[in-house]
Image: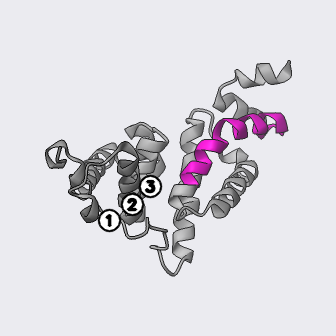
Amino acid sequence: MFFTRIEKKSDEELMHRVQQGDARALTALYERYSARLLRYFHRMLWKDRAKAQDFLHDLFVKVIENAERFRPEKKFSTWLYSIAHNMCKNEYRKQAFRNAAVFVADQSVENLAHARLAQQQFKVALEHALDRLDDDDKNLFTLRYDVEMSLEEIATVLECPEGTVKSRLFHLKKKLAARLGAFHPENIST
């Protein structure tokens, strides 16, 4: 019965309970966010599932350790993704190479340009294009389209003006459109 009541509480209410030492509230927040955050870390950390899982657990340790820093007038999800974003930025600094992502073997957008492509092939090509993005663009794409954050939330996470987020998204879409040009209906032969 308690879990039914706690599951109906807002994220901010649950975080307030975490600040008071309520482990059940932390469990509820973990259950709400763990799958999405695992996908976020997986994409941001070179598709290394083990690293993504470690980061997920480390994130919730940080939530516990920094619970007093959360302000209830702020949105919990934005605060949580800000921590996740900073963890990724710190990891990038530690890595000697940033382009360690695994690419789809011998498949490039150019090789796919003249073939009729199914939806699965588009997904493969999109993943390939995303892997080729720099870390900032990859993060922006993930926050907007995987996590489905609003522009305002992304601006808060990235600590930049909303207009900057809009501009970066515009340029990111152009970049991806150029890389995925083979999938434009005019370029697909019938």
Mark 2 and mark 1: Cα distance apart in space: 8 Å
Mark 1 and mark 3: Cα distance apart in space: 22 Å
Image quadrant in which you'd find residue 163: top left
In the structure shown, which secondary structural element does the residue marked by tag 2 occupy?
helix
Q: Earlier in the sequence, mark 1 or mark 3?
A: 1
Q: Which mark is residue 173?
A: none
Q: Amino acid at mark 3?
A: Asn
Foreground: disc 1 or disc 3: 1
Q: Which residue is mark 2?
A: 128
**Which residue shows up at 20% across the image and 56% down it?**
114
- Residue 11's spot in the image, x, y percent? 65, 31
Most extreme residue toward the front is 190
Residue 34 in view (yes/no): yes
**Which residue shows up at 70% across the image and 23% down it?**
9
Q: Which residue is mark 3?
A: 139
Q: Which residue is mark 1?
A: 108
- Residue 45's spot in the image, x, y percent? 55, 63
Stretch in magenta: 18-41
